[in-house]
Amino acid sequence: MKGAGRQCGAALVVALLMLVVMALLGISAINSSTVNQSIISNVQSQQAAEAAAQDGIEQAISSIEAFRVPSARKLTIEGLEINVSAPVCIGSQVKSGYSLTTKFPPEDTHWELSATVDDKATGSKVVIRQGVSIVMPSGSCPL
């Protein structure tokens, strides 16, 4: 009987240690899920900023006027402020199938523009650069 009494006290200590270990594992799991949730939130805000920047570029290049009179634009899409740079002509060549003897041959013009989104609420910052090729009248590319 003497051995049984000592074992009851030891079982209590072991049970308490197991309870502490399980509590620490639970706290660790909660912390891990909180970190994962923060990572997912950051990725979502980054993707939203990228989509808004791409949408800003699409809106800017949807009109030929943006290339006739290049100018910067400031847009608001889904609550995000997008700054779209003025298109810059980086090159042109006479369109294939036309010769230089044609009075005003059309040209393949190559333009570059960028969109910047700086979301102060989430800290996301995105810069997207995109190139565009457009057939335009001769002399439209001011190099």
Image (cartoon, rainbow, N blue to C red):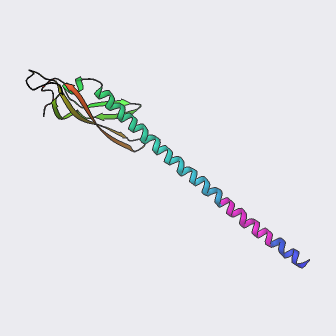
Q: Position of residue 110 (x, y in %)?
A: 21, 33
Left/right of residue 139 with respect to residue 24 in the rendered view: left
Q: Quadrant of residue 102?
A: top left
Q: Where, by quadrant of the figure, is residue 70 drawn? A: top left
Q: In this view of the protein, which residue sits in the foreground, 104 or 24?
A: 104
Name of the residue lying farthest toward the right: 1
Magenta-colored stretch includes residue 49: no
Camera-nearest residue between 25 and 79: 25
Chief secondary structure of the magenta portion = helix
Can you say whether 11 is above or below 73 in the image? Answer: below
Left or right, 61 with respect to 50, comes to: left
In the rendered image, the vertical position of residue 3 relative to residue 130, given as above or below: below
Q: How many marks?
A: 0
- Determine whether 65 is above or below 16 in the image: above
Q: Quadrant of the C terminus?
A: top left
Q: Say which quadrant the N terminus sits in.
A: bottom right
Does the magenta segment cover residue 19?
yes
> Which picture quadrant has residue 92?
top left
Q: Residue furthest front?
A: 97
x, y percent for residue 49 = 39, 38
Where are the magenta residues, as a range?
10-23
**Apparent side of residue 13 relative to residue 116 in the rendered image (left or right):** right
x, y percent for residue 83: 30, 35
Residue 36 to residue 143: above or below: below
In the image, farthest residue toward the bottom = 2
Q: Residue at x 84, y 76 (%)?
A: 6
